[in-house]
Amino acid sequence: MNGKKSNFDKSTTRYEGILISLGEVVNAAAIGAEIKSSRRICCEIYMPSDTARNLEIGAKFTYSLTDSHHLFYNAALTGRNELGFQEIPDEQIYRKEGFVYPKEAINVFFCKVKDISKKKCKDEFGTAEIKEIEGKIKFDKKLKDGSPLARGDQLLDTMVHLTRLDLAEGKEKKRLRKLIIKLLKSADESPIKEKLKKALEK
Ligand SMILES: Cc1cc2nc3c(=O)[nH]c(=O)nc-3n(C[C@H](O)[C@H](O)[C@H](O)COP(=O)(O)O)c2cc1C
């Protein structure tokens, strides 16, 4: 570690973060995770996705908390299920012992996949196949001070809804579009807000 003490809360907590896995290229996705007693991390990955394909038993991955909307945007809304597309350019990542993580992270958890199970989940969009991943946190590292983005942040919530918009149909799609427009109206002006408006027009 670089000498800085981790500010990671040891109780079980739900986070939103950037999961970086390795396939043909470095792959980043925005993923929700539960981190338990510092050493276990659980997430549910919708299939098909690059992340679901990359995460097999024994695979190394990093999970990073960040205050960067830009990083979330790249991870969630570019390169979706697109093997060979690197969402975060080389100059914005560090590599260490077979792990890759973003320079803009606040905290990084270095993990290895220990267990995988698959389940089907019925939601408003239909039936989805989910890969449940349980990982062991080998170590963690604090890169800088800051408050990680979490649900409740208008722009982050907008991104979550935008990733679901493609899957939705009919009434549900209309409802999501309305919700996104409302969130974007009340969000402060920023370059990322402009990008999200453009993503909605697509
Ligand atoms: C804040 C946030 C949280 C997300 N959480 C999840 C999640 O827990 N599981 C999931 O499969 N997708 C989640 N997504 C959507 C993925 O980030 C998105 O589908 C991504 O493009 C998948 O990329 P990949 O194909 O490169 O793996 C989330 C998106 C956002 C913005």
Image: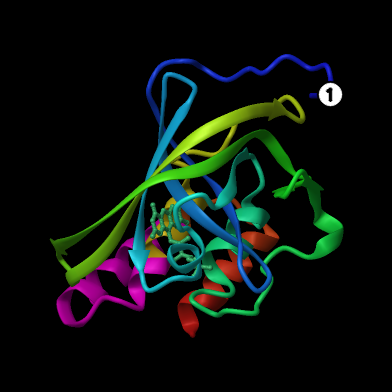
Residue 173 lies in the magenta-colored region: yes
Could you tell whether 42 is left or right of 106 in the image?
left
Residue type, mark 1 in image: Asn
Could you tell whether 89 is left or right of 188 in the image?
right
Q: Main secondary structure of the magenta part?
A: helix
- Image quadrant holding the N terminus, namely top right
Q: Of residues 124 and 202, which is closer to you in this image? A: 124
Could you tell whether 181 is left or right of 176 in the image?
right
SS at mark 1 in the image: loop
Q: Position of residue 41 (x, y in %)?
A: 43, 35
Q: Of residues 145 and 197, which is closer to you in this image? A: 145
Q: Residue at x 66, y 55 (%)?
A: 71
**Residue under pointer 1:** 2
Residues shaded magenta? 163-184
Q: Residue at x 72, y 49 (%)?
A: 98
Could you tell whether 151 is left or right of 192 in the image?
left
Q: Residue at x 34, y 68 (%)?
A: 164
Q: Residue at x 81, y 55 (%)?
A: 92
Vertical order, 65 against 23 (above or below): above
Q: Position of residue 88 (x, y in %)?
A: 72, 63
Vertical order, 55 against 108 (above or below): below
Q: Quadrant of ligand 1?
A: bottom left
Vertical order, 76 against 79 (above or below): above
